[in-house]
Amino acid sequence: MNIVFGKNGQVASCLREVLRDDLHKWRFIGSDECNFENPQNVTSFLENLGFIPAIIINSSAFTAVDLAASQKEKATNINANSVGEIAKFCEKNNATLVHYSTDYIFDGSGQTPFKVDDIPNPINHYGQTKLEGERLILESKCKAYILRISWVYSKYGKNFAKTMLKLMQEREEISVVYDQIGSPTSAFEVAKMTHSMLKNQLQFGVYHFTDGGFCSWFEFACEIEKQARKLGANLAVKKINQIPTSQFPTPAKRPQNSRLETSKLSEFIKPWQENLASVMREIITI
């Protein structure tokens, strides 16, 4: 039996689809069963499972970047301290850990994609907590895949693609920042990549995984509009304005360069526009 933490998140929801033929081998755990706000809850939960999981996938995270700045202890416990407890359990019991990290561990400087071994330098508390989670996993010496992902969206939960589509249906004009660059990444592709890593027994370590290609949030929004119109969605929007980050202030600073270098997994990567088309078809027919 294997474990997936964060059962209601985007990646875990997609994992259910990817793992559907073997779902009897997986147990999906939510915060109602194991609350990551108290790391000792995680330790106690794992020790009292009644079995030793062969694989633990941790898709649980505090992802509200702005709230992390004001709820520092909560973000640190969920993204770092509880992750450290899982890592210690995996090392002790020879279990494999899959953990998702983020482009936010980097400072967003420059214009070139960040490599796996580039020096992290987070510019907000969310990024700091995710980096600390990585450090605790690596220090534990457990068998682990750390998958850094970015700009994740899907038909599930709250995300940029669904928010933009809703705004486009409600407003004639919207504004989106143009000076933050990254790679939109389908949660379904992350789930497929996770399955492939485990199935093919790739070397343990840190990986970057995103959909192929780079764009700004503005370009992402324009492609969402294009795909939605192609699918016959009823949109009110007539104009999408591009604005600088300075005109859209947020409590937490965002990296302007979220590009990740993904060559280690290039054979698994498809263009972001192609994956967006697949997800949009699902969103619009829901």
Image (cartoon, grey):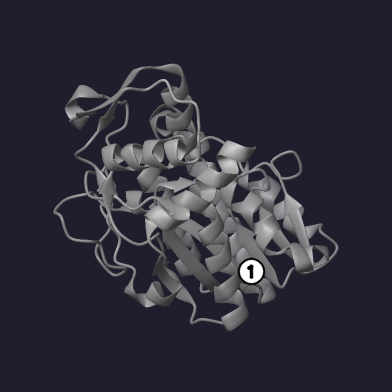
Which quarter of the image is occupied by the N terminus?
bottom right
Residue 9 found in image quarter = top right
Reply above or below: 194 against 65: below
* Secondary structure category for the residue under label 1: helix
Reply above or below: 186 against 56: above
**What residue is rendered at 42% in x and 61% in y?**
135
Is residue 61 visible in the rendered structure shown here?
A: no
Q: Residue furthest left?
A: 110
Residue 81 position, x and y percent, is: 53, 50
Residue 117 found in image quarter = bottom left
Reply above or below: 139 against 204: above
Residue behind mark 1: 90
**What residue is rendered at 33% in x and 74% in y?**
263
Residue 85 position, x and y percent, is: 60, 57
Residue 69 found in image quarter = top left
Residue 4 position, x and y percent, is: 68, 57
Q: Residues within 10 Å of mark 1 (few under 14, many from 20)?
A: many
Of residue 83 and residue 22, the one placed in the foreground of this image is: 22
Amino acid type assigned to the residue bearing label 1 in the image: Cys
Of residue 248 and residue 283, the one placed in the foreground of this image is: 283
Asked if residue 280 lies left or right of residue 115, the reply is right
**What residue is rendered at 78% in x and 63% in y?**
23
Of residue 156 and residue 65, the one placed in the foreground of this image is: 156
Is residue 278 visible in the rendered structure shown here?
A: yes
Asked if residue 109 lies left or right of residue 160, the reply is left
